[in-house]
Image: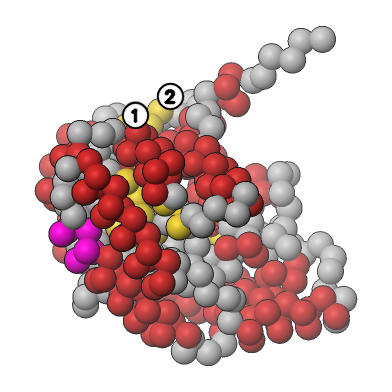
Amino acid sequence: MNYSISRRAASLTPSLTLAIDAKAKQMKADGIDVVVFGAGEPDFPTPPHIVEAAIKALLDGFTKYTPSSGIPELRQAAADKFSRDNGLVYKPSQIIVSCGGKHSCCNVILATCNPGDEVIIPAPYWLSYPEMVRLAEATPVIIETTDKTEFKIAPEQLRAAITPRTRLFILNSPSNPTGSVYTPEEIKALGDICVEKGVLIMSDEIYEKLVYDGAQHASVAAFSPQHFQHTIIVHGLAKAYSMTGWRIGLTAAPEPIAKAIDAIQSHSTSNPTSFAQKGAVAALTGPQDHLPLWVAEFARRRVYAWKRLNCMPGLSCVNAKGAFYLFPNISQTGLGSLDFCSQLLDKQKVAAVPGTAFGAADYIRLSYATSMESIEKGLDRIESFLRGRA
Ligand SMILES: *Cc1c(COP(=O)(O)O)cnc(C)c1O
């Protein structure tokens, strides 16, 4: 029997973060007191009214197939959200509900890219983007950035990266892994170039609600009708409602792209989980009062961690204004990010994600979506680690 796997599958890099994560989990299971800065999800529980809506849906027997692109109620609630929060007018038919924001991203890329097309991705990037582009047999074109520009690309860099084969530009603000937030002016300038060059933008706005220090989220779709026509928004409930396990993502797209995504989805996953969709309706239409509390708590942890990191020998950290990550520069320690993280885990029992996973070997990613107590303990240990080396 020939078990050789497809070229498509062979082109993927298994998640680098997984090795460290698995090791940290094993250490925990062995009773070792590990501090985990690796989490990509809020540490708060899903708000109870959302949970109750899903339970009610189950008890009411809402347990069958739904339309593949989502229940009309949820597509309407999502359209209302874009109108309310972003001033964007979408018909429910332009909204596709998928099995998580990650699935939404993958569908967008599969629906728009042909083999040989180029997709521009600023680094540091969310590690799944280039892999999804490879799955579509398209080519990731990476634009490097550093902490000197707060990991933001300049319009000229985008312009220089565009070729006749460019199909898509992936914008993720606020960013995972850096926490960077582009200003509305910066977003508009990038959007202007895509409009001029006829390049589609996939704007991943999943961290929209998690911004600090007066930073403002702007959707690139909102600047003009032309910007709107060039943009596909990916959104989801995972981060702002702490619903990572529910697997509900949203895409808002021009009608032909929405139709193409629906076709892909109808032959791959079919509908996202029926009762999770009911929970998502409750999330989007119900009270939003958990958000200011979560944002205030994230803000407090962020400032604390940021200040401490900048006092540690060999580290420097720019002030990230969004999401729940800090991305300190470790290049002065003389260690690459993989060695840094593996030694930190071995010697100090602290798990962090090497920047290499995100295309940036001089950095590590620390998530502050964990308790203040863990953050204090973890930072004490990172400090000991660095002083031990200094
Ligand atoms: C978390 C995340 C998503 C979506 O996550 P899901 O759990 O699939 O909804 C999308 N983009 C980025 C950058 C993320 O960090």
Q: Compared with residue 362, is residue 310 higher up or lower down, i.e. above or below?
A: below
Percent x, y of residue 340? 32, 39
Q: How is the image coloured?
A: secondary structure
Whether label 1 lies within 8 Å of ligand 1 gets the answer no
Q: Secondary structure at mark 2?
A: loop
- The answer to which quarter of the image holds residue 121 is top left
| Relative height, residue 313 to residue 295 (above, below) | above
Percent of width and height locating residue 154: 15, 47
**Crowding at mark 1 (Cα within 10 Å: few <14, some 14-19, many 20+):** some
Q: Eyeballing the image, is 264 above or below 85?
A: above
Quarter that holds the N terminus: top right
The numbered disc on residue 165 is 1
Q: Around disc 2, counting alpha carbons within 10 Å, would you say few (fewer than 14), some (14 to 19), or many (20 or more)? A: some
The numbered mark at residue 359 is none
Is residue 130 shown to the viewer in this render? yes
Q: Residue at x 76, y 10 (%)?
A: 2
Q: Residue at x 19, y 66 (%)?
A: 307
Q: What residue range appears in magenta?
A: 306-311
Judging by the rendered image, the residue that carries numbered circle 2 is: 116
The image quadrant that residue 211 belongs to is bottom left
Amino acid, disc 1 = Arg
Which numbered disc, 1 or 2, marks the residue that appears first in the sequence?
A: 2
